Structures are given as structure tokens and as C-alpha cells.
Amino acid sequence: MQLGVEMEFWVVDEMGDLCAGHDLTEAHENAVPEFVESLVEITTPPRGSTAGIAESLTDVLDTLLRGARETNRRLVPLGTPLTANGSPVTSSRGDMLERIYGEGFEVAKNCAGTHVHFEQGNVARQLNLLTALDPALALVSSSPFYEGERLATSSRAYAYRYKAGHNFGKFRDLWEYTDDPDEWERRLQWLYEELRSMALNRGVSTEEYTDYFDPENVVMTPIRLRSETPTVEWRSPDTSLPSQVVTLLEDLAPLMAQTDDLPVEVGDPGVTNDAIGVPAYAELQQLSSAAIERGLTSPFVWKYLERYGIDTTRYHPLSGQFYAGDTIPEERARRVRLEAARLLERDVDALHTTVTARR
């Protein structure tokens, strides 16, 4: 199975303040600007193994970190910038989203995630298994703070799903299981038309809307179907340390590969010789809420993940390693960002050593 990863990182100056970073991406073809100036994204080409993903992540991050050091900047692997992000929107699509979403768009400006692409196989099974694995976001949660307040172990996921506004929930929520990928596509088409109506009511012309949106990119749900590659894209996790993302793939890729041979059925969670069991959707919603709010401190969550053969003791999410108050002032947030940046630099060095030893 071919795999791919996208990771977003905040850019800060030597004091820990968010700053412009899009110029850093000019040094590597697998780095691209994001829609706000303090956020950059790195991508990997399709690779056939987690070792290949580790190699690609190391390659692009080595380049970006070197460029950042030369200009007294750092990259920060946190799901949110901890306090409010005042960086301006710098893309035409971002401007369009801001016009449509209004204040609800502030959520997106304060979130950085990891997106994992799995080569499409039996798409219905893949969609349903990734839906059931939504609580695995707890393994790499990296920021409990959103706009200065402690929200949840994954404040990024909490904000995305619960703070964007009622009208936009359907564009961001976890969807129910499906037996029919065509039904999934029909729902996308329906949402595409609904968002177009909302856009028209906010003064966006039909021509502008169709220039920037299609049914594939109209939603920011935790799972998306991508036709160009084609892949199933899993968007539940925070951005985090690259070694943690590689470990996550080591656990998830073998599970996803089994969907070629085993049906995915509602029942007892876990893998047997006959099927991959997933919980009823109502139970899954409770698990996802616990994963977002409490992470691996919830026995409900870690026991569930271990039923899929995931050794949760291998994970040490960043979200539990920093400041422990209910609020975080800007001065403290700057120090935490710099601390997270140092962890990223050490992590990339260690990953580089591992990659080199494998060659």
C-alpha cells in the first residue's frame, strides 16, 4: 500500500512569536505555504513503507529547519499556537473561506494537523476502519490550549468539531459508517451545493465559488476521499513530532492493508481471522469525545486502541508534556513554542540517524 503524509508547522521568531514563514518553503519542492503566513506545510511523495515516509519527512524537514536557523526562526510541532493567531490570510482560497465562514474561519487559522494518505483499495472498508480509528488521534495530541485557554487534550480537534459554528458542523464532523462509496460522493455533492448557496448569500459569485471549490475539497472532515492520487485521507491527528507520526503509521498501515481481505463489520472491536470489528457509531462517538478531551489518560480510549493491536505505551503525546495551567499567558506560550521547536529539532536529528542506519 502506498502511503503519504502532510504535516503543518507554525513558524516563530527567536522570541517565540508567530511570524511569516512562507519563504522557507522555496528551498524544497515538498514544502508549500499554508493559507496563513505563520503556517507551512510539508508533504511526502507516495512511499511504499513507513521507512520511506520517515526518509521523506527527514529530507524536507532538514532543509526547512536549516533555512529557519539561518534566519533566526524555528518550526513548532503543535496542534494550535496555544494563544490566538493574528497572522493574516495570504491565499485567495483562504480569503474566500473567510468571506463564507466569517468568524467561524478563525478556528482554521488556529489549527495545525497531520494528514495521512492511504492508497485506495476497498474504499468502503477503508472509510469505515478509519472512522473507527478516529480515537487514535489521542496518540499524537500535541496542544491542550486554544486561544489561551485549556480546552481538551487535543484542543485542535475540539475546536474544529465544536467551535466552528452550528451551520458548519456538517462540513467538519466525523461521518457515520457507509457501505457505499457512491453514497459518500452524493453527500459531498449535496454539501457542495449547500455551501454554494451560503457563499452566494455572502456575496460570492458563482464563478468565484467554482474557481476555488469542488465537491472533493468542500469539506474539512476527519476523512476525505481524494480522486487525483487516488487516496483515502485521514485528517484526525494533530501535527506532532515526525517520529510519533511514523510510529502511528507503523500501527495503522498494517491494519489498513487488511481491509483488502477482511470485511469491516459492526461488532466487537478488534481483528479476527474473519473480520475487522468496529463499534456501533454511537459508541464510537463517545470514544472520540473521550480521545479529544482526555486522550490516553482515559482507560476507555487506550483499552479500545489496544484491541486493534496498538501498543499505547509507545506513545508520549506532547499535549501532556508542557504547561499545566487552565490558561496560558502569551509570555509562557512563547517559551512553550520554543521548547517544542527544540524537541522537533532533536527529533529530526534522531530520525535522520535512524534513516541513515537503515540505508
Image: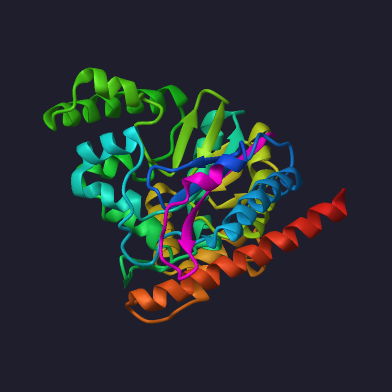
Q: Position of residue 333 (x, y in %)?
A: 40, 73
Image quadrant holding the N terminus, namely top right
189 vs 62, left or right, is left
Residue 142 belongs to magenta span: no
Q: Tell me: residue 277, above or below residue 225.
A: below
Residue 211 image point, x, y percent:
32, 21
Q: Nearer the viewer, residue 23 or 83?
A: 23
Residue 298 at least partly seen: no
Position of residue 89 measured from the top left corner of the image (x, y, whole percent): 32, 44
Q: Looking at the picture, does residue 95 appear above or below residue 17?
A: above
Q: Residue 154's image quarter?
A: bottom left
- Left or right, residue 3 beside residue 234: right
**Residue 100 sits in which quadrant?**
top left
Spot the residue most to the front. 71
Q: Nearer the viewer, residue 193 or 8?
A: 8
- Does residue 4 show up magenta in the picture? yes
**Residue appearing at x 56%, y 40% in the figure:** 26
Give 299 or 348, whichever is nearer the viewer: 348
Horizontal side of 206 relative to 182 (left or right) equals left
Residue located at (32% from left, 77% from top): 327
Q: Picture coordinates of residue 97 (x, y %)? A: 28, 37
Left or right, 78 with respect to 58, comes to left
Judge whether residue 9 can be spotted in this image.
yes
Give the residues in magenta. Answer: 1-25
